[in-house]
Amino acid sequence: MYPFSEGCFAVRNAWYVAAFSHEVTREPMERWFLDEPVVLFRTEAGTAVALAGRCPHRQYPMAAGRLEGDILVCGYHGIAFAADGRCTRIPTQDRVPAAFGLRAYPLVEKWKWLWIWTGDPDKADESLIPDHAAIGLRDAPGANGELSVPLSHNHVGGRYQLLHDNLLDLSHLAFLHSSSIGMEAIATTSDEVTSGDRWLRSARHVRDADSSPWIRARYGVAKVDFVIDFTFHMPALHVGLNRTSISADAAERAGEVIRDSIVYHAVTPARRHSAHYFFATTINAPATSEEAMAPIAAGIAKVIEEDIFATEEIERMIPADRPLRDLMTAGDVAVVKGRRMLESMMKAERG
């Protein structure tokens, strides 16, 4: 499936963000992951559960059922399932066949995310989830006001790799986001691309550039030095350092950091032509409160909307009846490498 070879869709033996913690409650909720429906809910003890979302009897959506204690009851014919997926009752018969169960997906709650394992459950190694402390996610505000905040989940009407491509080629910031965070120098400054086992990094260091409209409006600064350093933890999470300083060549306050944040873009395949897009951030400087996040969150939401617009418009342009070939530029090193690494992971799973 474009942009991959025929037969390649997504990496299955991997952890993906399924939801923010606050989204999953005692009310069963349906989400699709890698073209399969999943029902999410919490037990009475508060443990999050992920089960296959179709009843094996007539394929009725399990999220349209109800919870009786920790038993999920199908809303169509009353067939009941325990939190581990075992069928506990079939009203029309006394015997419960062993095959009458729901797949239970490994689910791990870390920080304010729920991570789901979509492949072979015997290979569900929690150490493959990016180390949250190492990437700057905080469970509580730091001494200097550092704050990690979950901001948005969007269901995007475009295949997931379009979002990955968007995040691997940040030269688009200068144009798609020209009215907010964009600076032309981001496009004209080459990125340094490095990679390792299941990770890919793209870093730009911009010096003495015209500041973005957002920085000018908020801080009144005309010339800045800017670092944008993104690491893709394959296949699900992009972690980006954004640091803006007053230009080292400025007459006053040279080199002073005015904006320092880490952003987290989690991309999870939903169906063949749709994806889940989760966004969170850690603000490091200046000190930030929950209340002060409101205007920042509003600005970020506008940027995310522009990325979603681009993704869905590209999806609309992709022909369904013939292969498509992209013509690449010098700015596409990370995009090409990212696609190749993901496809290599898919083919390795297929053996």
Image (cartoon, rainbow, N blue to C red):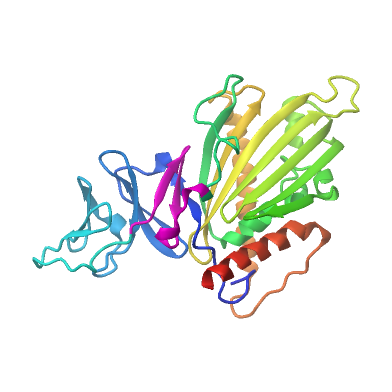
- 227 or 200: which is nearer to us? 200
Q: Is residue 172 above or below residue 57?
A: above
Residue 110 on the magenta span: yes
Q: Residue at x 46, y 38 (%)?
A: 112
Residue 174 in percent (x, y) is at 78, 47
Q: Residue at x 31, y 64 (%)?
A: 54
Q: Is residue 311 left or right of residue 189?
A: left
Residue extent of the magenta highlight:
104-127
Residue 321 on the magenta span: no
Q: Is residue 47 left or right of residue 197?
A: left
Residue 276 in percent (x, y) is at 51, 54
- 322 or 329: which is nearer to us? 329
Residue 319 in percent (x, y) is at 62, 74
Residue 65 in percent (x, y) is at 25, 55
Q: Residue furthest bottom?
A: 321
- In which quadrant will I find the N terminus? bottom right
- 145 or 211: which is nearer to us? 145
Q: Is residue 7 above or below residue 240?
A: below
Could you tell me if residue 173 is visible in this image? no
Could you tell me if residue 350 is visible in this image? yes
Q: Is residue 339 above or below residue 351?
A: above
Q: Residue at x 83, y 60 (%)?
A: 330
- In which quadrant will I find the C terminus? bottom right
Q: Is residue 11 above or below residue 169?
A: below
